[in-house]
Amino acid sequence: MSTNRKNRKSLELTPKEIAALLEASHITEEEIQHWHADFLHHCPSGQLDKKAFTEYYRKLNPREGLNDSFEAIFDMIDVNKDNTIDFNEFLV
């Protein structure tokens, strides 16, 4: 998924992004919209840096281990290596 959400003014998902996320995530459009709203609630800019990701991921997975594992997960998710994660990268 190579959409460049980071330079857009609107953080709303486009129909094309929703279709790609439906295919990649295998969850419903309603679930995608729910996750997207939650993501934007916790990250209004639409981007998570490594520190913000660690805090957000810890909220989602409170039993998960050390910060080092969160940082490794961040590095795997940040497919374009710009040191931020947008919603599309996060969900996929």
Image: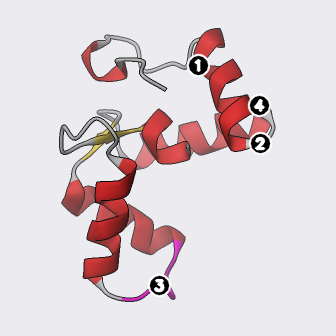
Q: Position of residue 45 (x, y in %)?
A: 29, 33
Looking at marks 3 and 4 on the same chain, the residue that comes earlier in the sequence is marked by 4
**Cα distance between the residues tagged 3 and 1:** 29 Å
Q: Which span of residues is magenta-colored?
A: 61-65
**Cα distance between the residues tagged 3 and 4:** 27 Å
Query: What residue is at 22 percent from the left and 57 percent from the top?
Result: 50
Q: Which residue is mark 4?
A: 29
**Cα distance between the residues tagged 4 and 1:** 11 Å
User: Of helix, strand and loop, which mostly describes the magenta segment?
Assistant: loop
Q: Which residue is mark 2?
A: 26
Marks 4, 1: nearer the viewer: 1
Marks 2, 3: nearer the viewer: 2
Q: Position of residue 39 (x, y in %)?
A: 47, 45
Tag 4 and tag 1, C-beta contact below 8 Å:
no
Callout 2: SS: loop
Q: Is disc 2 surrounded by few (<14), some (14 to 19) or many (20+) residues within 10 Å? A: few
Q: Position of residue 15 (x, y in %)?
A: 65, 11
Query: What residue is at 34 percent from the left and 41 percent from the top?
Result: 79
Q: Which residue is mark 3?
A: 64
Q: Is disc 3 surrounded by few (<14), some (14 to 19) or many (20+) residues within 10 Å? A: few
Q: Which mark is residue 17?
A: 1
Looking at marks 4 and 1 on the same chain, the residue that comes earlier in the sequence is marked by 1
